Every structure is written in C-alpha cells, then in structure tokens.
Image: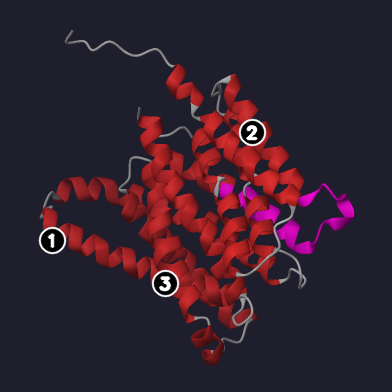
C-alpha cells in the first residue's frame, strides 16, 4: 500500500499549497514577485537547514565515504530541481500579481497550476511507462474541473495572468519528473538545496528588476513567513517524501487537489466569490483524486515468500 501512504503525504502538501495561494495573493499587493520568491526561499532553506543540523546531531551520522558518494548527486539534483522550481514559482507569482481586481486570483491560479496533472500523465508515455486506464479517467476529471473554472465562459475570459500561470504548470511538470529521477536522495537535503538555488537567483533578479521596499516587506511579513516555512519548507519536503511512494502520474493527480483548497481558502479568507460552476469544478477534481487511487486497490495482493 505504498501508493496510499504516498498519496496521504502528498494530500497534506496539497492542502498547505492550496492555502498558500491566499498568502501569495495577499503579499502581491505589497512586494514584487522576485522579492517574494527570494524571501520565502531563503526562509525555507534556512528552516530546512536547521532541521538537517538537528537530524545530523541526533543520528550521529559519521559515514564519510557514504556522504562523499552521495554529495555530487545531491548537488546535481538540488541544482536541477532549484532551477526548474525558480521558473515555476516566479511565473506563478507574476501571474497572481497581474490579475485584474475582482478576479478570484487564488482559486483561478490554483486550478490552472493543476493542469500539470495532465502533462505529467502524458509525459509518462515518452518514458515508456504504461498507465492504468483508470488514471486517464482521473485526468479527464481534472481537465473537466479546470474547464469549469477557466473556460466555461469562452476564451475571451483568459487573462495574461492565466498564460503565465499555465507556463508555471509546465515548469511544475518538469519539477515532478526531475524529483522522480532523484528520489534516492534524502528528501530534506534535496529540498533545502533547491531553495538555496531559487533564493540566490531570485535575489539577484530582485535587485535588477525590482526595488525592494522594507515597509512593504514588513506589511507582508506573515504571508512571507507562512509560505517560507510551511509551503517551501514543509510542503515541498512532503512532496519529495510522498513521491518516493507514488508513481508520478498518481502523485500529480493528488497534488492537483491544491486547486480545490486554493478556491476554498480564497472564498473563506479573502471573500473571493465561489460560483456554482467553480464548486462543480472542485467536486470533479476531488473525484478524480479518489478515482486515481483505485488501481492500488485493484492490484492482486502479493503472497509473501515466507508463506
């Protein structure tokens, strides 16, 4: 039942990310996209760095040969994950920042981001991975849910923010696939390294393209702290841990529930209007996540070799 264990871990991550959309929307009124990403990434890396130090002291790990053997692979994985995540997070934050007033940006960005569920499923074909037919039914449910949010009123309702967030979804697809390739590396270490990379690049671009405003940063300190510790530090670590126990296609479908949580959080916290069709979209995505778990229950149980 490894897939089920991984799905539960990923579900918790999805909830944190979904509520983080509210924090991102709130912070966008006071700080620029690169500033926000730089600060949350530095906080996330620092939080995980402290956790790694505590873990090292508690476990008293002294196997130098093993550490050297994994070091290069860990650095490579952290660099690749960080580079892809840099584009994903900044495109998402830029998209949220430029949405017009009156648009339910938290929920809208959440659902468009969740389109990576389709991309991950399709990309499996290029890696010669066979998917259970039920997974495609789940993908169809996710697509239908996102259509109810963004396109049921026609293409004229698409904003520039939608396009940027969709590009972010492409980057998140690549991020999931890269993580899958480095699933043997310690989840916390890999996550910490990726946020160091994101933080460094975002800080450079922050000083080039934006004028960091200390007053604005202090106004948005709570959203920045929440996304830094919970979204960056905790949720991404849970993602990496969860993906070790779940196939990328199933993992992406479970994580797409962040779109449902983002709509509900935007409705409850920010008072964003939740239309009937948006509610139907939430239900469709939630149903898709449940359906995606069915193949695990349909697998024949393996007989233990000791019996």
Taking depth in this image into account, of 115 and 1 the one nearest to the observer is 1
The residue depicted at 43 percent of the width and 34 percent of the height is: 246
Total tally of numbered discs in the picture? 3
The residue depicted at 37 percent of the width and 66 percent of the height is: 45
Q: Which circle marks residue 11 in the picture?
A: none
Q: Which residues are magenta?
A: 150-172
Disc with the residue nearer the chain's start (2 vs 3): 3
Q: Which circle marks residue 139 in the picture?
A: 2
The main secondary structure of the magenta stretch is: helix
Give the alpha-carbon distance from disc 3 to disc 1, as whole Å. Answer: 23 Å
Q: Residue furthest top?
A: 307
Residue 240 drawn at (x, y percent)? 40, 47
Residue identified by numbered label 1? 57
Q: Quadrant of residue 132?
A: top right
Residue 126 drawn at (x, y percent)? 60, 29
| Pointer 3 local density, CA inside 10 Å: few below 14, some 14–19, many at least 20 | many
On the rendered structure, is 281 left or right of 49? right
Give the alpha-carbon distance from disc 1 to disc 2, as whole Å. Answer: 44 Å
Residue 157 drawn at (x, y percent)? 85, 57
Q: Quadrant of the N terminus?
A: top left
Residue identified by numbered label 3? 42
Disc with the residue nearer the chain's start (3 vs 1): 3
The residue depicted at 13 percent of the width and 61 percent of the height is: 57
């Amino acid at each position: 039942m490894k897939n089920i264990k991984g799905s539960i871990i990923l579900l918790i991550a999805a909830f944190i990310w979904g509520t983080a959309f509210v924090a991102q929307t709130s912070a966008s009124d006071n700080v620029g996209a690169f500033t926000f990403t730089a600060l949350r990434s530095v906080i996330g890396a620092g939080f995980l760095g402290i956790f790694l130090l505590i873990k090292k002291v508690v476990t008293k790990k002294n196997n130098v040969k093993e550490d050297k053997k994994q070091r290069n692979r860990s650095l490579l994985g952290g660099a690749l994950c960080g580079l892809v995540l840099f584009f994903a997070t900044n495109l998402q934050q830029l998209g949220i920042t430029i949405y017009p007033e009156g648009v339910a940006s938290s929920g809208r960005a959440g659902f468009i981001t969740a389109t990576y569920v389709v991309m991950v499923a399709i990309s499996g074909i290029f890696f010669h991975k066979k998917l259970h037919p039920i997974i495609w039914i789940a993908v169809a449910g996710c697509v239908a849910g996102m259509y109810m949010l963004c396109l049921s009123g026609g293409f004229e309702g698409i904003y520039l923010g939608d396009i940027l967030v969709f590009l972010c979804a492409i980057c998140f697809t690549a991020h999931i696939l890269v993580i899958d390739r480095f699933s043997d590396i310690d989840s916390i270490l890999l996550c910490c390294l990726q946020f160091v990379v994101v933080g460094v690049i975002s800080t450079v671009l922050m000083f080039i393209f934006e004028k960091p405003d200390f007053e604005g940063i202090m106004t948005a300190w709570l959203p920045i702290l929440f996304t830094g510790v919970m979204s960056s530090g905790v949720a991404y670590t849970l993602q990496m841990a969860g993906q070790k126990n779940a196939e990328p296609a199933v993992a992406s479908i479970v994580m797409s529930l962040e779109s449902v949580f983002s709509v509900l959080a935007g409705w409850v916290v920010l008072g964003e209007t939740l239309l009937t069709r948006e509610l139907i979209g939430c239900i469709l995505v939630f149903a898709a996540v449940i359906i995606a778990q069915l193949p695990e229950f349909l697998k024949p149980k393996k007989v233990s070799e000791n019996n």
